[in-house]
Amino acid sequence: MDKVCISVVIPCFNGEKTLSRQLEALAGQNCDVKFEVVVADNKSTDHTRDIVNEWNDIDDRIQYRSAFGAQGINHARNCGIEVAKGDLILFCDADDRVHPGWIRAYWCAYQSGAQLMGGCMIPTDETGQQIAPAFGLNGNAKILAWPTGANCGIARCVISAIGLLDESYRGGGDETEFFWRAQLKGYQLIFVENAVVDYTQRSNWKSRIKQNIGYGQSQVQLYRQFGAKAMKPPLPGHSMVAAATGLLMMIFPSKRYFGVARFGRNCGRILGAFMFQCWRFL
């Protein structure tokens, strides 16, 4: 039997409504080397396991892995890594959809020497309609770059060298911590343009605010861990001003998508300042 070269790990919690769409997209991938798909079930209470088993009957490359030891996306990812056979580990999410050529694009980059990789994200609604401009790696000149965890790849040798993902990060920062840690150890992060994912956004703006609050809290946690090595210190009062600006943007339908994110994220930074006693985020 040919060696498995690529392992796709999908952390999943109650993914029965969307998981089949993602598994169908992965099963249809055309790649010159053997790959597997590991669905790491993080304490789902729906029919996630049944769905994976049904797909396994159709395509034995798709496998189920329980990740019941703790609640959290990085625990699920780490459980998937533990059983993954590939030298290249790819991550995507149960509620998104990879484009044709996704696995091949990452494999080509890996064959060219890439060890840390991130792809292109297309924000869509639940029907698959694009709702915001596509984007690549996150970060700017003030912040060390990182890919979105729903579309990234890591060579196994990097994980062996620096360790697994940090399970203390929940609700945000989960992928960022690993990619910052790896870059600070000397590994280079590469953008893989042709590795494209439809990135499903939550339709309920209240749930999106809650999600972005988690992102903001994690940014404070990241700053406590990495400091100025990865992030430029925020200006005094920035979080409060940015939260107010985001709230104002939410009034206008054309700016609501970005306003929700700005408002939630900066509220999270304010909460995070108290949680992690990092007062510069106030």
Image (tube, rainbow, N blue to C red):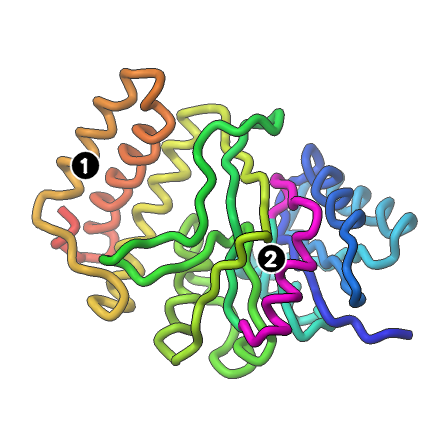
Please tell me whether mark 2 sits on a helix, a strand or a loop.
strand
Q: Can residue 71 be seen in this view?
A: no
Q: Is residue 98 magenta?
A: yes
- Residue 157, x across and y down, in percent: 57, 80
- Residue 57, x across and y down, in percent: 91, 50
- Residue 15, x across and y down, in percent: 66, 40
Between 272 and 126, the one lying in front of the other is 126
- Residue 45, x across and y down, in percent: 68, 41
Between 18 and 89, the one lying in front of the other is 89
Tell me the quarter of the picture where residue 209 sits. Answer: top left
Q: What label does residue 78 carry, if any?
A: none
Look at the picture and state if 258 lies above or below 51.
above
Residue type at the position of mark 1: Ala
- Residue for point 29% across, 54% down: 140
- Residue for point 60% across, 61% down: 69
Q: Is residue 81 left or right of residue 275?
A: right
Which region shows up in magenta? 93-114
The residue at which mark 2 appears reads as 91
